[in-house]
Image: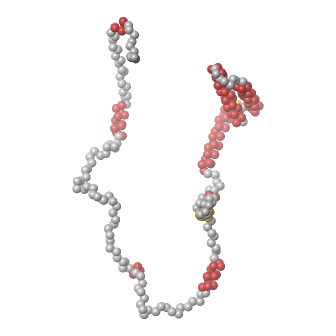
Amino acid sequence: MSTTMYPTESIFNLIPREEVKIEKPPRYMSKFRARVKHEKMLNKPTNKTMGPVKVDLPSPEKYLLKHSKEPKLPEKQPFSYLDDETFKKPQIPAKADNPLMGIHTKKDFVKTNAFENIMAVPKKPQPIYADTKTGDKQLLENSGLLPKYIKKKDFGKTPEYLQHRTEEVRRAQDEYDSFVKEHMRQGTMKQLSEDERNNILQGLKMNWGELHHQYQGLSVVTDTTPKKYRKERLELEMKQLERDIDLIERYKTIFIANN
């Protein structure tokens, strides 16, 4: 079945119609076009992406050789001993040379070693820890388990960034206090008293209780549009009251503008 749609037959369709040519408005040309183009050409670096205009070609005689880019060892030099006498070992003693004999000392090495061991400070064992069930031991010094940070110079002091943040908070609070005092002096703002605040809070809670009572009385099944709209309206009003109650309970001091 063909799905081609033809226009409704009418005698007026036989009348030739004049072709209407849509004339486009002239293209907008900014008066700063020439200046911008000139500045762009001035700031454009030459040969930025295409490289220099002319590149010297390598000579055919200097072609890349095999292993030419591999690192080369320094040239081998013959080994030779230094002529300086200080670097030479002493000569082997001759058969006729006799060692020094008859040298005696009065030092008692037994007593000296005993005295040094008695007066020596015993070495402290290095602290270790076992990190496996088989008893493998590791040094405790560099394990990160020792509180080495208490030995730092700035331990127990407030960091600078916290001091700056506290100063910014104090400055902002001072500016807000001066702003409030200025408006209080001009009479454009007043502070709610404790009684007014409690009355408003109690009124909001009563309104919320009435809306909650109406919400509890709604039908469980919202099968019609009015029921759906009424449920959504009650939920929005209850959420708004909850936000207002939370705002008033959170802040003890409240300022309002005088109308």
Q: Name above or below for residue 195 compared with residue 226.
A: below
Q: How is the image coloured?
A: secondary structure
Q: Nearer the viewer, residue 151 or 177?
A: 151
* Residue at the image position 47 percent from the left and 91 percent from the top: 99
Residue 102 placement, left or right of 90: right
Name the residue rendered at 61%, 43% in the picture.
168
Image quarter of the C terminus: top right
- 175 sits to left or right of 203: left
The percent position of residue 158, horizontal first and vertical second, equals: 64, 52
Q: Is residue 198 left or right of residue 9?
A: right
The quadrant in which the N terminus is found is: top left
- The residue shown at (62%, 48%) is 162
Q: Is residue 228 visible?
A: yes
The answer to whether 15 is drawn above or below residue 220 in the figure is: above
Between 247 and 241, the residue placed more toward the observer is 241
What residue appears at the point 65 percent right and 35 percent down from the top-left corner? Answer: 179
Residue lying at the far top of the rendered structure = 11
Vertical arrangement, residue 62 with respect to residue 26, above or below = below
Q: Position of residue 42 (x, y in %)?
A: 34, 39
In terms of image quadrants, where is residue 9? top left
Give the residue furthest to the right. 195
